[in-house]
Amino acid sequence: MKEDENGKNERFEYMSTQNLFAVVVPSATLKDVISSNSLKDFVIEQKAGFQSGRCTMLIVSFGRLDIQKKKLHQLSIEIFEKHRTQIVQIDTIPEMALFTAQYLRSLARREKKKRMTEDEGGDGNSGGHKLKYQGEKGIVIGARSEIVSDWWSKMLSTIDRISDAQRRSILGLIPDPIAAIDKYSKMDYSLALNEISELVAENGRRVGPAIAHRVLTMLTDETGNSIIG
């Protein structure tokens, strides 16, 4: 999101050819980091733990960041110019789920490109991605598959009226959302909808078309404007 001269927010998207990773930080924690003038050290520490070489870091502020707009704007420009780091503000869980879905779609595209490069005899180790969450228990980090699986479960939990049993059945069918993005993007919508909606949860109830539609939207929406609720 970018704010124009009239104070209105406009949405824009971009594609980065560099390695990209995101660190999710509660807004109160990020405010403390900024107020203590330790943001630079925080960025350097996080990037050092990712990998050497050129990469772009996204600091995702979860919750409203209570920082003066002018100060935040100047700070954003400075850390991008010096450290290739951007600050993204996300206020709600549904917005976080959509951000994560878009992030996973980006990973899926780059994984596909990476595999094609490997098949052609190129170096498949040129890219890297990592998603971390810094919360009350500190930074939670692990293999990409573990992080993706954890976030996928959290994303499903944001769907309105989904039960734990339904969520678990969907996780059983779709353990890897990155592979699912590629699969369902190519699949006929009615077939995909039927495959998910006919899932029977452990309590004997079907997932149903309403929740199946929301799952498909989460995985395949290309605009970022669909409401998942």
Image: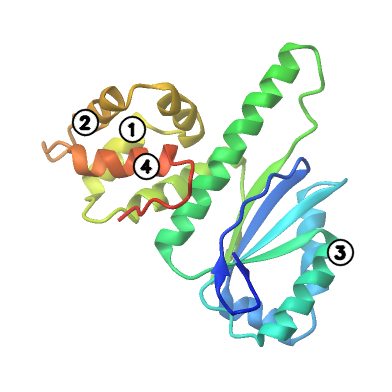
Which mark is in front, 3 or 1?
Answer: 3
Mark earlier in primary sequence (2, 1): 1
> Disc 3 to disc 2, how far (Cα)?
49 Å
Q: Which residue is outermost to the left?
A: 204
Residue at x 31%, y 44% (from the top left corner) = 214
Which mark is in front, 2 or 1?
Answer: 2
Residue 159 position in % (x across, y down): 30, 53
What amino acid is found at the position of numbered circle 1 in the picture? Gly
Mark earlier in primary sequence (1, 4): 1
What amino acid is found at the position of numbered circle 4 in the picture? Thr
In depth, the one of 153 and 71 nearer the eye is 71
Mark earlier in primary sequence (2, 4): 2
Q: Residue 163, can we see it?
A: yes
Mark earlier in primary sequence (3, 1): 3
Q: Which residue is outermost to the front?
A: 6
Per the image, the residue denoted by label 1 is: 172
Left or right, 184 with respect to 20, comes to left
What amino acid is found at the position of numbered circle 2 in the picture? Leu
Q: Mark number for residue 199?
A: 2
Task: State yes or no: discs 2 and 1 in contact (Cβ < 8 Å).
Answer: yes
Q: Which structural element holds mark 4?
A: helix
Which mark is in front, 3 or 2?
Answer: 3
Per the image, the residue denoted by label 3 is: 81
Q: Residue 147, can we see it?
A: no
Residue 63 position in % (x across, y down): 51, 74
Task: State yes or no: discs 1 and 4 in contact (Cβ < 8 Å).
Answer: no
